[in-house]
């Protein structure tokens, strides 16, 4: 649906300073300021995925800042986007949502310099984030090369955990697992942006692992092979998936990206759902040349991304993902 909507927009006038637009569905826009510096701009917001307002603010802010890190940048400024049903939600609750977002931005060294608020039917919170990146360090969801190693920075499963949360069946352990993952900033992206052996990077969010990897393959004109057993998963998230929990968005992702994916005929339903599960504040997906893969993986682990793992590689050929 998003592709159809964007297809109706008039093409923007050519602009040599717009280094990254929406041609490939990249994570953020990047605009050149001078020969060496560029500005990163992005926005992200959504309705509550947890009941606690402070935690909702933290998760939403983490998710929004991730787009800046995914292009190799560092966020420098944020504006809050707030929509609240003011006749239903107390002032204290709204303040806690804002405080949660502010706590994440403070940890990232990002001032919230303002924003905009409206009265809405459902609660909405997020950020418009501005960052900076050296022109030479810009990473995109295109540029992967045959032979590149694919590294995933966090475990999958926040979609399953969120679904259980909405059903009122999520355990305390599951909630803590979701919160720990969805509030961990992907700030390692700025370091990865400075590496010449990192050829492509994106964050895995609403389109799921296969959806975002499909964009990398299509934009880079490469194939990819994924090792099912190597994909890290959150512990409780995996338990929920194996128990049969699923999300409607996973089904939509499955249909949207089916043409570019080849799955095993005997693939268990829960693994199929895991591959398409939409993530909130999800992991970075990195394509790095083989000689640098060990060092990049060690960098992830050294920065506290304990679940980071090599999950496959890119190859020559049509942009097709093979999972085995």
Image (cartoon, helix red, strand yellow):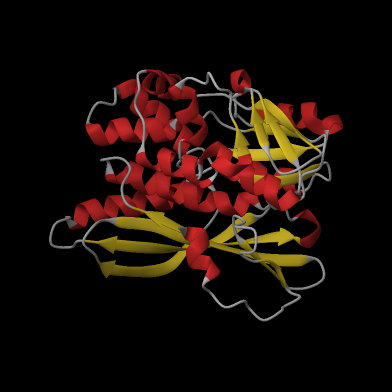
Q: Is residue 51 left or right of residue 153?
A: left
Tag count in the figure?
Answer: 0
* In front of the other: 122 or 107: 122
* In front of the other: 289 or 281: 289
On the question of residue 187 being in view, the answer is no
Vertical side of 274 occupied by 198: above or below:
below
| Quadrant location of the N terminus in the rendered image | bottom left
**Residue, far right:** 291
Who's the residue at 50% across and 63% down the image? Answer: 4
Vertical side of 220 occupied by 15: above or below:
below
Q: Quarter of the image holding residue 246? A: top left
Vertical side of 161 occupied by 255: above or below:
below
Q: Is residue 211 left or right of residue 139?
A: left
Q: Position of residue 276 (x, y in %)?
A: 49, 36
Who's the residue at 25% across and 40% down the image? Answer: 51
Vertical side of 58 occupied by 23: above or below:
below
Q: Position of residue 225 (x, y in %)?
A: 70, 30
Q: Quarter of the image holding residue 56? A: top left
Q: Is residue 29 left or right of residue 191?
A: left
* In front of the other: 87 or 260: 260
Q: Position of residue 288 (x, y in %)?
A: 78, 37
On the question of residue 145 being in view, the answer is yes
| Quadrant location of the C terminus in the rendered image | top right
Q: Position of residue 55 (x, y in %)?
A: 34, 41
Who's the residue at 62% across and 50% down the image? Answer: 69
Who's the residue at 40% across and 23% down the image? Answer: 241
Q: Quarter of the image holding residue 118? A: bottom left
Q: Is residue 277 left or right of residue 263?
A: left
């Amino acid at each position: 649906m998003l592709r159809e909507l964007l297809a109706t927009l008039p093409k923007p006038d050519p602009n040599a300073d717009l280094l990254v637009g929406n041609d490939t569905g990249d994570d953020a826009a990047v605009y050149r300021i001078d020969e060496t510096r560029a500005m990163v701009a992005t926005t992200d917001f959504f309705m509550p995925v947890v009941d606690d307002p402070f935690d909702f603010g933290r998760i939403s802010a983490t998710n929004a800042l991730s787009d800046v890190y995914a292009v190799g940048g560092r966020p420098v400024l944020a504006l809050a986007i707030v929509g609240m049903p003011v006749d239903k939600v107390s002032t204290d609750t709204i303040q806690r949502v804002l405080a949660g977002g502010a706590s994440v931005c403070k940890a990232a060294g990002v001032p919230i310099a303002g924003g905009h608020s409206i009265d809405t039917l459902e609660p909405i919170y997020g950020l418009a984030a501005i960052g900076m990146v050296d022109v030479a360090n810009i990473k995109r969801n295109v540029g992967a090369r045959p032979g590149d190693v694919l590294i995933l920075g966090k475990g999958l499963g926040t979609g399953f955990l969120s679904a259980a949360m909405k059903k009122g069946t999520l355990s305390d352990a599951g909630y803590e697992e979701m919160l720990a993952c969805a509030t961990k900033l992907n700030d390692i992206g700025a370091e990865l942006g400075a590496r010449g052996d990192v050829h492509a990077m994106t964050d895995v969010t609403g389109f799921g692992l296969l959806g975002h990897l499909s964009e990398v393959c299509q934009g880079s004109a490469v194939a990819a092979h994924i090792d099912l057993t190597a994909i890290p998963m959150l512990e409780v998230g995996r338990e929920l998936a194996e128990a049969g929990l699923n999300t409607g968005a996973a089904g939509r992702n499955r249909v949207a990206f089916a043409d570019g994916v080849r799955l095993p005929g005997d693939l268990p339903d829960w693994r199929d759902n895991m591959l398409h599960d939409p993530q909130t504040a999800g992991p970075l997906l990195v394509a790095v040349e083989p000689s640098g893969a060990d060092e990049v993986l060690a960098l992830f682990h050294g920065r506290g991304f304990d679940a980071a793992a090599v999950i496959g590689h890119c190859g020559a050929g049509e942009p097709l993902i093979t999972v085995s």
